[in-house]
Image (cartoon, rainbow, N blue to C red):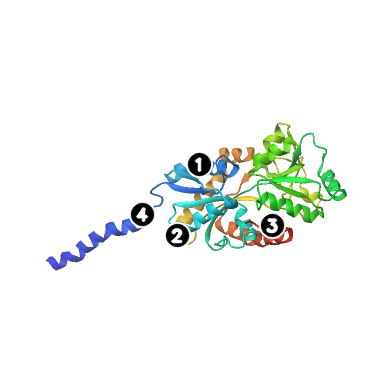
Amino acid sequence: MRRRHLPALGLALAVPLVARGQEAWPSRPIRLIIPFSAGGPIDTVGRMIGEKLREPLGQSFIIENRTGAGGAIGLRNTVQAPPDGYTFVLTSSSLAILPAIYANLGFDTRTDLTPVSLVAEIATTIVVRANHRFAALGDLVAEARAKPGTVTYGTSGIGSSNHLSGALFGTTAGIELVHVPYRGAAAAMNALYAGDIDLVFASTVETLNHAREGRARILAVTTAARIPALPEVPAAVEMVPGYIAPNWYAIAAPKDLPAPILARMSRELATLRGDADFRARFARLGAEPLMSAPDVLAARLAEDVPTWQRVAAAAGIRAE
């Protein structure tokens, strides 16, 4: 009789172990690393996402700002984290730019992370002071051609997506612009108003309110077409054929994230596309949420990394 009961007893003991091994995800708060400063545009978007996913996932998101090296430090923290579904990173198109400007990054953004979602495409703007002599993009190009090396543009730093957008604009338009890096887009905008520089390359998240308040004039956007938030503003490609500078936000996770967790996270993010409040808040930033499937982000990385490698090499842009 004892022998007949032993298998049943063994099974009974094993059940809790199996249950623990297949514990439902998530069972504790999720860390969302943002490789940029608190209060910035990506930080704002990250907090919006965390707020919206808290109820469906049943867990809060802990926002962790790991700044430095153009986003590389935050990404390195993500690469080194266990692939257990409790660490994600929300970053920008720096995900595609960093391999182009660092000779020894220490990881490959295409193979050492799990793509989760292309969150949104964010238009980069070319902006001047409201009273600047450049009334249109054509004025800028004409002066830069007539006086090479005299027109200055500010960005959020060396190797940033805005820096490479400016470098690509110069080479595509056949003009020489002088780059002036700052510690963040806000500092660049302050320099613009002080008259220290002629223009700024920065996202709509950072410039739209300035334009709406009448303090700045957006000459163009760097997207393939005009954007709904600024229908009257031309895309730079309308004047400079071939010039498109993609800028986007994306979520990734450590390599080898379990497929069920990836599927659940992707599914919950996708539901935000239909959230009216979420879309309205994105619209105020001049963007539209994409919340794509993982393969869309993987394809974007495969396309953009070589593009920025060519731009960085042509302009001699290297991060120390």
Where is residue 228, by image quadrant? Answer: top right
Q: Disc 2 on helix, strand or loop?
A: loop
Task: Say which mark, if any, is on residue 52.
Answer: 1
Disc 2 vs disc 3: Cβ atoms closer than 8 Å?
no
Which comes sooner in the sequence, label 3 or label 4? 4
| Residue at image coords 78%, 53% | 170
| Residue at image coords 42%, 46% | 29
What amino acid is at disc 2?
Pro
In percent of width and height, residue 259 lies at: 46, 60
Q: Disc 1 on helix, strand or loop?
A: helix
Task: Say which mark, if any, is on residue 23.
Answer: 4
Task: Say which mark, if any, is on residue 317.
Answer: 3
* Left or right: 28, with 278 as reference point: left
Q: Nearer the viewer, mark 3 or mark 4?
A: 3
Disc 2 vs disc 1: Cβ atoms closer than 8 Å?
no
Number of numbered discs on residues:
4
| 6 and 202: which is toward the camera | 202
| 307 and 188: which is toward the camera | 188
In percent of width and height, residue 127 lies at: 74, 41
* Left or right: 198, with 53 as reference point: right
